[in-house]
Image (cartoon, rainbow, N blue to C red):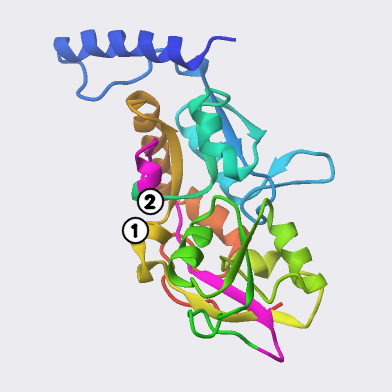
Amino acid sequence: MKRLLIIATSAFFLCANAAQAGFFAEPQYQNKDVLTIVFGTDVTYVPFESTNSNGEIIGFDIDLGKAICAEIHARCTFVSQEFDGIIAGLNAKKYDAILSSLSITPERARHVDFTQAIWDAPNALVSLKTQPLKANNSALKGKKLAVQMGTVQESFAKKHFPSAKVKSYKTIEGMYNALRTGHADAAFMDQVTPSFVPPGDKRFQITDSVLSSADRETLGQGTAIAVRKNDHLLLRELNRGFDAIRANGTYQKIAQEYFTFNIYNHESPLSQHF
C-alpha cells in the first residue's frame, strides 16, 4: 500500500506544474483513488467514538470521517489509540490524522495542525442528585473530582478547581466506576457524553455546566481533526471534504442521527439527565 507521504509528494509536483500552466489555482489530486488516510481514535468516547459488538469502530466522528473521505475520494481506516498518547502516536507516524473529539487549544497547536472546527459542546459536572455540586472552586473544595487523562476538562479542572482533589482516569468508564464506588464525588467531562453512557446509577446526574467560552485557551475553540505539523496537503484535503459535507447537507443528516441539538455550534447548557 502506498503511503501518504509518497502520494503527497507526487501530488505536490503535479499541482505545482499545473498551477504554473494556469489550469487551476488550488492543488488537486490527479489520481484520487489512491489517497490513503489512517485515523487514530480513542474508542471509549460514546457517541463520538466507540466499538460495536463486532469490534468495528463507530460513532459520530467516524461517520463524519467516512463522509469526508468519500468527498475527497480517499481510502480511510480507523485504528484505536488511548487518548492520553494520541498526539504522540500521530507524531510517531502510527497514523496520519487524529479524529477523536480533540479540542483545538494553543498548547496542542504547538504539536499538531488542526482543521477547522467540526463540532463544539459545553462541559458537564456530574454528581449526586441529593448533593448536587456546582462547577466552581468553592463548591469543590476537598471533593474528589474525576477527569479523563489528556482532556481539556482535566486541564480546566487543575487550573480552575485547585481546591478539589483532581484524579485522572484513562477512560470515561473509569470515571464512572469511580463515581459508583465512591472514589469520586463528581466527574467533569464533555456534556454530551453522560447522556449516552450513563453510569448505571440513578443517584447521579449533570448538576452544572461550563461553556467552552468560559476559558477558550483551556477548553478550546471546538473540536477538530489533527494532522502532523506542516502536513499542508492532507490538511487542505480534509478541510475541503468537510466544507463539502457541510454544504451538501450530509453533515446535518449525520448529526440528526445522534443529537437533538446543534452540535456544530452549541453554546448553551444541555439540561440532560441520566
Q: Are marks 1 and 2 in contact (CB under 8 Å)?
A: yes
Mark 2 Cα-neighbour bin, 10 Å: few <14, some 14–19, many ≥20: some
Say which label, 1 or 2, has the lower sequence index: 2
Q: Give, as a three-letter code, the residue at label 2.
A: Thr
Which amino acid, by three-letter code, is at mark 1? Glu
Question: How far apart, in angstroms, are the residues tagged by discs 1 and 2?
Answer: 6 Å
Q: Position of residue 94 (x, y in %)?
A: 58, 24
Q: Looking at this view, name the residue that lies furthest to the right.
A: 53
In the rendered image, residue 17, in percent from the top left (x then y), is placed at 22, 8
Residue at image coords 48%, 57%: 152
The magenta segment is 107-131
| Total labels drawn | 2
Secondary structure under tag 2 reads: loop
**In x, y percent, where is residue 241?**
42, 37
Q: Position of residue 243 (x, y in %)?
A: 37, 43
Q: Which residue carries the number 2 mark?
A: 105
Which residue position is annotated with label 1? 217
Crowding around mark 1 (Cα neighbors within 10 Å: few <14, some 14 to 19, many 20+) is: some
